[in-house]
Image: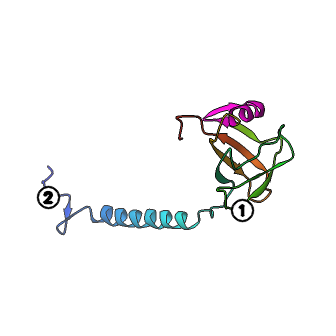
Amino acid sequence: MNHPDSNRIHGSTFPGRRRRAVWLAAAIGALVTAAAGAALPLKTIEECLESGTDLVRLPGVAGGSLAASQCSGCPSVRLRFDARTRYFIGKEPVSYARLREAAAKGDLRLDVFYDPKTRNLTRLRLVAAGNDK
C-alpha cells in the first residue's frame, strides 16, 4: 500500500523533475534571447511625402517624372513613374486619369510614396474628402 509521503524524497517532491524544469526554462530563455538578437536589421523599402495637390504638378499621363515637396518652402524631390506605380483615392485603387481628375478639383492632401534607392514612384494616394486614413 502506498503511503501519502512515499513519493517524497528528502522533503522534496520529485527533485529530478524540478531540476529538469529549471534547465528547460533556462534553455528556452536562452533560445528566445538568441533569436531576438539574430533578427534581421530593418531597412527602408518605401518613403512617403505627405504633400498636397498644390505642391505636386501631375503630368498629363503617367510617365516620365514629377517633382514633389512637403511644403511651399521645402526642397522638392524628383521622382519617376514606372509600370508598377499604383494610384488610389482613399483606399480605392483607381486609374491615373481618375486620380488626376480628382486632384484637379482643389487643394487636397496627396501622399507620394517612392523607393528611396531608385526614386521610382510606388504609389500616389489622394486622400478622399472626409477620409484621413
Residue 94 location (% of width, % of height): 71, 31
Residue sitting farthest toward the right = 64
Image quarter of residue 18: bottom left
Q: On residue 5, which mark appears?
A: 2
Q: Residue at x 64, y 56 (%)?
A: 71
Q: Residue at x 59, y 35 (%)?
A: 128
CA–CA distance in space, label 2 to label 1: 81 Å
Q: Is residue 103 left or right of residue 36?
A: right
Which SS class for mark 1? loop
Image quarter of residue 82: top right
Image quarter of residue 84: top right
Q: Quick check: marks 2 and 1 in contact, CB under 8 Å? A: no
Q: Is residue 91 magenta?
A: yes
Q: Is residue 6 left or right of residue 99?
A: left
Residue 123 location (% of width, % of height): 71, 43
Residue indicated by mark 1: 75
Q: Nearer the viewer, residue 70 or 2?
A: 70
Residue type indicated by callout 2: Asp
Magenta residues, as a range?
88-103
Q: Is residue 10 above or below residue 113?
A: below
Number of callouts in the render?
Answer: 2
Q: Earlier in the sequence, mark 2 or mark 1?
A: 2
